[in-house]
Image (cartoon, rainbow, N blue to C red):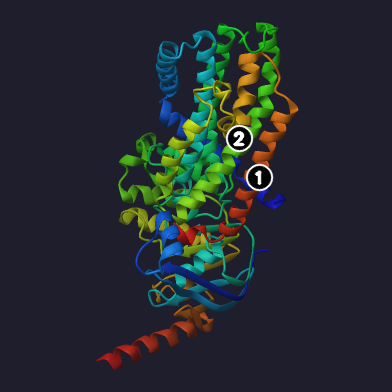
Amino acid sequence: MHAYLGAIWNCRFFWLSLVKMDLRSRYRGSMLGIFWSLLHPIAMTAILCVVFSCAFGQDLRSYAPFVFTGLTFWGFFGATLVQGCLCFFQGESYIRQHPAPMAIYPLRTVLGAAFHFSVGLGLAIVIGLLAGPDLDRNPSATRLHQLLALPSLLPTCLLLLLFGWSLSILTGLLNVRFRDTRYLVEIGLQGLFYLTPVMYRIDAFKDKHRLTLLLQCNPLVPFLDLIREPILLGRIPSVTTYALATAVVLLLGATAAAALWIEERRLIFHL
Amino acid sequence: MARIELEHVNLTFRVRRERRIGLKDFLIKRLFLQSQNPIMEVRALQDINLRLNQGDRLAIIGHNGAGKSTMLKLLAGIYQPSSGRRLVEGRVSSLFDLALGFEIEANGWENIAYRSYLQGETPASVRAKKQAIAEFSELGDFLNMPVRYYSSGMMVRLAFSIATAIEPEILLVDEVLSVGDLAFQSKARERMRDMMAKAHLLVVVSHDLDSLPHICNQAIWMDHGRIRMMGLCAEVIAAYRSSVGQGQAAAA
């Protein structure tokens, strides 16, 4: 394990330069490029705001930052899953030439996605501060509370990075064995979107206890809470929330490490 | 000290007879149906024992499909043995599949950096070598263009220039000498000879039986994934030649 991480570190210049190249080819060196990557969550937020404010009478001031943070997280989650499927094919020509640790290829994918996520998160913080804290849910909060709670996002980002890395490793390995994984993942992702409180709040189903319980079992919920509480409510998430998210990351990370342990040596025969 | 040791190394590929299966097929067939698509085993390397030390120059000869290139990839660490022990000590550089491993959207300079990093260089050492690599490749202004627009000859030229810019302890070569046009080829040969002379340990796969004895002192003759003969280069080549000759005579 230690030696493996060391090997990943030793070829850091390689994967870092590939990540840099991925980002540059996507943005072509312009600010407009970064705007393009934000366009999707912004447009979706606008649409959902119109729909939810007209149809369900949502208060836009608290709803817009809520849904934007959700979509930013979802963009990261989806990218690590779907693009993760292709990570080993993307690196195939290197794999065939040089014995580097396999984990660097999913890492390339997840670091690219993490960059987009951090840009989105930056905008989410701006939106959150402009709108002010959600006083319905945390009446005593002020903008100062929001600012003070922001550093709590740092451990969250670290957890998300490990979470995304593990996911990319798993879908990447699965897709090498079974080429249709990507399509199934895309379908599953669409279904999961509606089971995750991205565009609605769990407390909208207060009177349906079973549904609420089901939604709360979703392992993505702690991550969403970790992102939303400091930005929207101006408070540092509870230790329980961190612990839940950490547990999910550990579980997934252990699974990914085990899968990599088994597949590392024979992956190339299936490419 | 460069050192290679293989002990009872086996390498078995498992392939499906028909085609790859998808996750849907996998789940459905596992649950409901017998597999219509059995797994076949290809024993690419069988019971290979090899011990090479500093200063050894080994030639690998044999028919197509005898396992020569597989052996080289196993030595490079790209394939791992299915069973047995593989020990390689020393910085390995491999010259095979040269046209692979380019980011086609990035330009030549960037690709020089990526490949060098993969070979274990650092930004500082790449900066020092970049110019020499560019000069050797003779690609000039093309290096500012995305590799997408390169001809295959240009790609191989660039790859060769990068791969041979380091001083390896162990050099693995797979008949790569068809590099670029005629002028570049003779230059490439010269650099190869230079590198082979400098390398502490050399393994070459080639069909060029005439030039091998000049480069190598030992040889193995591979046949159907096994080492059929191992010994001094000239003797093994002579035995291989006479066996091929007999085969042709029998056929005629």
Is residue A204 placed above or below B74 in the rendered structure? Answer: above
Q: Position of residue B205 (x, y in %)?
A: 45, 69
Residue position marked by numbered label 2 in the rendering: A161
* The one of A156 and A112 positioned closer to us in this rendering: A156
Q: Chain of mark 1?
A: A
Q: Position of residue B21 (x, y in %)?
A: 39, 60
Q: Chain of mark 2?
A: A
Q: Quadrant of residue B63?
A: bottom left
The dot on residue A251 is: 1
Left or right: residue B148 compared with residue A149: left
Is residue A150 placed above or below B102 in the rendered structure? Answer: above
Residue at 66% x, 34% y: name it: A245
Q: Position of residue B75 (x, y in %)?
A: 55, 66
Name the quarter where the C terminus of chain A is drawn. bottom left
First in sequence: mark 2 vs mark 1: 2
Disc 2 marks a residue whose amino acid type is Leu
